[in-house]
Amino acid sequence: EALDASDQLTDILAIPEHLRDALWKVESAQIEPQDCPGGVVVAGMGGSAVGGALARAILGDTASRPLIAARGYGLPSWTTPDTMVLCSSYSGNTEETLACYEAAGALGAPRIAVTTGGQLAKQARADGVPVIPVAGGLQPRAGVAYMTVAALQVAALCGAAPRVTSEIDVAAEHLEALVMEWGPEGAEDSLAKSLARSLHGSVPVLAGAGLTVPLAYRWKTQINENAKIPAFAHELPELDHNELVGWAGASELGRFAAVFLDDADTHPRVKRRIELTEHLISGQATSTHVIASRGQTTVERVFSLVLLGDLVSLYLAVLRGVDPTPVDAIESLKAELA
Ligand code: PA5
């Protein structure tokens, strides 16, 4: 019942549709290609920042120029007047993103906004800055497909990476099958449902490597916002040089479960590290899991794990009996700051 009532569920199941719609929305903004030797900075926060990080993971070595997600009040120090600044804010009213928009203007850097409206759209229109529209009525974090596609297409328009339009189209088609497999209509022992049951009652600790680093972070943030529990994300091989030691004492402080996000392109030594690390912590964690991305292209592989993590976070919310949609703490903090 809680699932039926959740608009978050509808939005997660619509990720394939969002990918296709996002391509149209970028097209509709009719942005002229502009060579940007300084690369692309995607300025945003929370659910609106993740698109930049996922686009970077999707492009991998095919990106010929920097593509960086900047989460904060300022742009990276290396931003120059020939760096494109893509200001990404679902609401268009996030103060950090608005500050980056201003900072890019002061620097004379080209700007594009991706937003549903708010102050960002208003200011961009007044300044003659292109605005990529985003479907309204979603929670910002459910706009992940829109924000990622915008970052990918802007990178291509700026000469920072090849176009991946057809890969996005094909991925959308393949993801439909995963929606059936892992969604509420799928089997009770589907990976998404059984993983949620196994994680329930523990603090999830996520680990990514290479392509899956921003995905581990996405799982963490979705579990935080939808299931309303703490979750932590780190990356391999780095965590084998510190966090591995800390896990030894974690069981005295509470229950934790480890999830390693794997991919076909994970470095062979990192794959071995995952096996060994899982074995070393198996006595301390309530459960450990190695979850592999699915699909051929990096667009498919990245979005297979976005979909799975989003569904797991939602099933965890249902198991906990909490409404996944409202994020009251974020709203009240924003109101206090206003
Ligand atoms: O998912 C959420 O609600 C948040 O993480 C928001 O994305 C974050 O607070 C930034 O807001 P916005 O996406 O409107 O810029």
Image: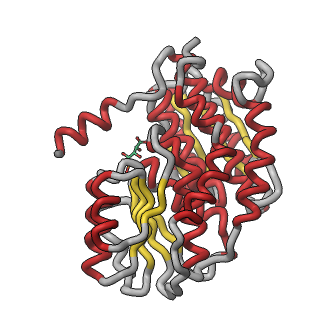
Q: Position of residue 51 (x, y in %)?
A: 53, 56
Q: Residue 327 vs residue 34: left or right?
A: left
How many callouts does the rendering have? 0
Based on the displayed image, in which of its 4 quarters is residue 258 positioned?
A: top right
Color style of the picture? secondary structure
Q: Residue 118 vs residue 298: left or right?
A: left
Based on the displayed image, in which of its 4 quarters is residue 209 positioned?
A: bottom right
Res. 100 visible in picture = no
Q: Position of residue 127 (x, y in %)?
A: 29, 73
Residue placed at 66% from the left, 45% from the top? 17
Residue placed at 61% from the left, 26% from the top? 199
Residue placed at 64% from the left, 54% from the top? 212
- Vertically, is 157 above or below 298? below
In this view of the protein, which residue sits in the foreground, 195 or 82?
82
Q: Position of residue 151 (x, y in %)?
A: 54, 65
Residue placed at 49% from the left, 69% from the top? 68
In this view of the protein, which residue sits in the foreground, 77 or 50?
50
Question: In the image as oriented, which residue stretches furthest toward the top?
Answer: 1
Task: Check the picture and name the quadrant holding the N terminus.
Answer: top right
Task: Check the picture and name the quadrant holding the C terminus.
Answer: top left
In this view of the protein, which residue sits in the foreground, 18 or 84?
18
Q: Position of residue 180 (x, y in %)?
A: 78, 31
